[in-house]
């Protein structure tokens, strides 16, 4: 994912791949925890939330690196 982001942006992003992996793991863990509890989250699709969260995160990385 990070390599694809670097290729797409056309820049040489200085990103720690291990750190990105941990951030994405934390997104996954948070969503899994949220949906494992009896809460009012049934109207949301967990896969959709994760996909949107990771996409937003990666776009933010690209934006921050290009400034």
Image: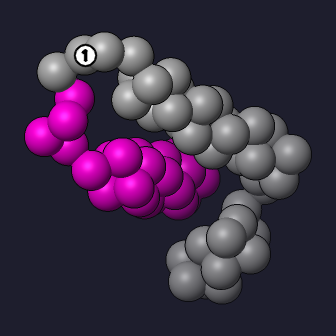
36 on left or right of 16: left
Relative to 54, say whether 8 is above or below. Answer: below
Question: Against 2, is 38 above or below?
Answer: above
- Splitting the image into 4 quarters, where does residue 8 fall? bottom right
User: How many numbered marks have been drawn onto this rendered protein structure?
Assistant: 1
Most foreground residue, 5 or 34: 34
Disc 1: CA contacts within 10 A as few (<14), some (14-19) or many (>=20) = few
| Residue displayed at 76% across by 47% down | 21
Q: Magenta residues? A: 41-66
The residue sitting at 74% across, 75% down in the picture is: 3
Name the residue at 68% across, 40% down: 25
Tell me, yes or no, if residue 52 can be seen here. no
Q: Is residue 53 magenta?
A: yes
Residue 37, image quadrant: top left
On the picture, is 53 further left or further right than 62?
left
Position of residue 27 measured from the top left corner of the image (x, y, whole percent): 54, 36
Find disc 1 in the rendering and name its residue. Answer: 39
User: Furthest residue to the front?
Assistant: 38
In depth, the one of 6 and 47 nearer the eye is 47
Residue 18 falls inside the magenta stretch: no
Say if 33 sits above or below 51 in the image: above
Which residue is drawn at the image coordinates 55% and 77% (left, top)?
9
């Amino acid at each position: 994912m990070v390599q694809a982001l670097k290729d797409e942006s056309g820049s040489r992003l200085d990103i720690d791949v291990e750190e990105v992996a941990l951030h994405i793991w934390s997104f996954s863990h948070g969503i899994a925890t949220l949906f494992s509890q009896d809460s009012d989250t049934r109207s949301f699709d967990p896969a959709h939330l994760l996909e949107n969260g990771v996409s937003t995160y990666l776009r933010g990385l690209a934006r921050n690196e290009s400034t």
